[in-house]
Image (spheres, grey):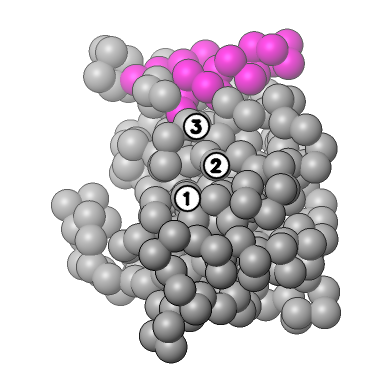
Amino acid sequence: MNPRPPLPGGPYLVVGLARSGLAVLQVLGARGERAEGADAKLGSDGLAELEHARAVVKSPGVPAEAPVIAEARARGIPVLGEVEFAWRLIPNEFIAVTGTNGKTTTTELIGHIHREAGLPVTVAGNVGTALSTYVDELATAAVVVCEVSSFRLEDTVLFAPEGAVLLNLQPDHLDRTGPSRTTVRRNCASSPTRATTTSPSRRSGSASRTSAAARGACASAPGRPGRRWSSGRASCGGTTSR
């Protein structure tokens, strides 16, 4: 299990008050932390609230170029994305799924494999429920499978899940990221694929426990005759899907 780094000290400013931002505020409130929220769509750019903050948590829908985020970084104030914020507070084994296409399908498949194998699992992230919703809510044995988009990865700092999948990488969301190679390098560098460098002999307990049971679950999956389980890919009837 990868140790989780502590959160930076508060008070906190949560920027972006949609699903993810509200979940973060609820977690901070439950922990007795001082926190304020700001959302440009609600009439606050967050610059006034930044005067009281020692750390910022950014929702994935807020671009890095937003004035309050740029100002926080210029002042040396830590900025965390919602996924890293929640990951630091969730000690469970964690699998992150990213890539331009196929994230939701793959995330749901990994969750399905765990359930068919009789292993407790929670699916979160882009796929539906904000990850912060599960802070202090999960059984110790539960595995978290989280769909993480490039918007969520761009604010990671020390994010290092126990397992990860990078499906593919193609130009997308250019209205936000632009076509620059710098953006691609930044998102790749911050992606959870660095967690996959662990050798098979050092895999997390979940991966070890899952593999044997998953072979049976995959073999019995409807419409998938001849599926074979292997590290990093699934083969169906001789055709490999990466």
Residue type at mark 2 is Val
In the picture, the disc for residue 123 is 2
* Res 31 quadrant in image: top right
Write down the region rendered in magenta. 20-39
| 3 and 2 marks in contact (CB < 8 Å) | no
Identify the residue at image location x=42%, y=24%: 19
Query: The N terminus lies in which quarter of the figure?
Result: bottom right
Secondary structure beneath label 2: strand
Label 3 element class = loop
Percent x, y for residue 164? 58, 64
Label 1: which residue?
108
Work out whether residue 83 or residue 54 is closer to the camera in this orientation and state it.
83
Magenta highlight on residue 1: no
Query: How many numbered marks appear?
Result: 3
- Give the spatial CA distance, label 1 vs label 2: 7 Å
**What x and y, as percent, mark residue 186?**
43, 65
Q: Amino acid at mark 1?
A: Glu
Q: Give coordinates of residue 61: x percent, y percent.
A: 34, 36
Query: Badge 3 is on which residue?
Result: 130
Q: Quadrant of residue 239?
A: bottom left
169 to 118, vertically: above or below:
below
Q: Is residue 86 left or right of residue 204?
A: left
**Marks 3 and 1, Cα distance to the nearest angstrom?**
15 Å
Instruction: Please state which amino acid type lies under the numbered disc 3.
Output: Ala
Q: Is residue 180 left or right of residue 196?
A: left
User: How many other residues sit within 10 Å of disc 2, few (<14), some (14-19) or many (≥20)?
Assistant: many
Q: Is residue 224 visible?
A: yes
Q: Residues within 10 Å of mark 3 (few under 14, many from 20)?
A: many
